[in-house]
């Protein structure tokens, strides 16, 4: 089993474990939030653009103070190169209204890059701004926009990414 499948299975098990931990009688915030979306990235140094799906699981260990988000984003270009980003973000939330939330976060990121027949792994740092929109009062389904900036320490590769 390769690392990307292991990360995906671990994320799903984490989400399932937290989802079942919440009792049916309790109508508070969900124990875990699963985020599914699309991601687009582009290099600020002229390396081109990439896109792909985005998957993350978010938990709130300290209400109104700390959210933890673990995510995976496979990004692909039209030149047959791929990049798998796995990150762990430490985020501070601000509730702007019952339906709008703003979150700022930072954290480490692991980057697996396959380009021009070579494969490299490196560590990166990431910073994001997360805008969450909840259409209903109960936070069961919502929309998010998460622009981010990462710096790859292995290659000096700087890019922007939006999920």
Image: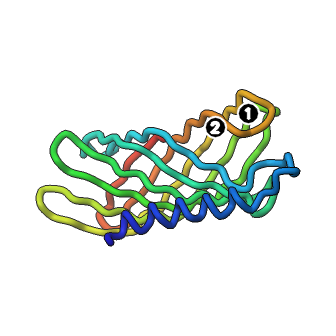
Q: Secondary structure at mark 1?
A: strand
Q: Is residue 116 left or right of residue 52?
A: left
Q: Where 133 falls versus 148 (above or below)?
A: above
Which quarter of the image is occupied by the N terminus? bottom left
Q: Is residue 146 left or right of residue 95?
A: left
Residue 144 position, x and y percent, is: 59, 36
Q: Residue furthest top?
A: 135
Instruction: Determine which quarter of the picture holds residue 123.
Output: bottom left
Labels 2 and 1 touching (C-beta < 8 A) = yes
What residue lies at 41% left-to-right and 68% top-to-bottom?
Answer: 6
Q: Is residue 29 left or right of residue 14?
A: right
Total tally of numbered discs in the picture: 2
Q: Of label 2 and label 1, which has the lower sequence position?
A: 1
Residue 122 position, x and y percent, is: 34, 69
Q: Is residue 98 left or right of residue 42?
A: right
Which residue position holds label 1?
100
Residue 163 position, x and y percent, is: 48, 41
What residue lies at 30% left-to-right and 55% top-to-bottom?
Answer: 83
Q: Give the color scheme: rainbow, by chain, secondary structure or one colour.
A: rainbow
Q: Residues within 10 Å of mark 2 (few under 14, many from 20)?
A: some
What residue lies at 51% left-to-right and 43% top-to-bottom?
Answer: 36
Residue 54 position, x and y percent, is: 45, 46
Front residue (pair 37, 128): 37
Q: Residues within 10 Å of mark 1 (few under 14, many from 20)?
A: some
What residue lies at 75% left-to-right and 50% top-to-bottom?
Answer: 30
Q: Secondary structure at mark 2?
A: strand
Which residue position holds label 2?
131
Front residue (pair 75, 130): 75
Tell me the number on the disc at residue 82: none
Quote the CA–CA distance across marks 2 and 1.
7 Å
Instruction: Determine which quarter of the picture holds residue 51.
Output: top left
């Amino acid at each position: 089993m390769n690392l990307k499948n292991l990360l995906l299975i671990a994320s799903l098990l984490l989400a399932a474990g937290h989802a079942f931990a919440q009792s049916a009688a309790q109508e508070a915030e969900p124990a875990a939030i699963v985020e599914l979306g699309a991601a687009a990235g582009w290099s600020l140094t002229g390396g081109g653009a990439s896109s792909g799906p985005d998957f993350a699981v978010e938990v709130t260990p300290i209400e109104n103070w700390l959210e933890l988000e673990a995510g995976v984003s496979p990004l692909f270009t039209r030149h047959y190169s791929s990049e798998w980003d796995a990150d762990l973000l430490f985020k501070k939330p601000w509730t702007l209204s019952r339906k709008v939330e703003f979150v700022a976060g930072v954290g480490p990121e692991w980057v697996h890059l396959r380009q021009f027949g070579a494969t490299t792994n490196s560590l990166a740092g990431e910073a994001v701004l997360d805008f969450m929109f909840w259409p209903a009062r109960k936070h069961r389904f919502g929309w998010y926009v998460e622009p981010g900036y990462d710096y790859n320490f292995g290659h000096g590769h700087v890019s922007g990414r939006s999920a």
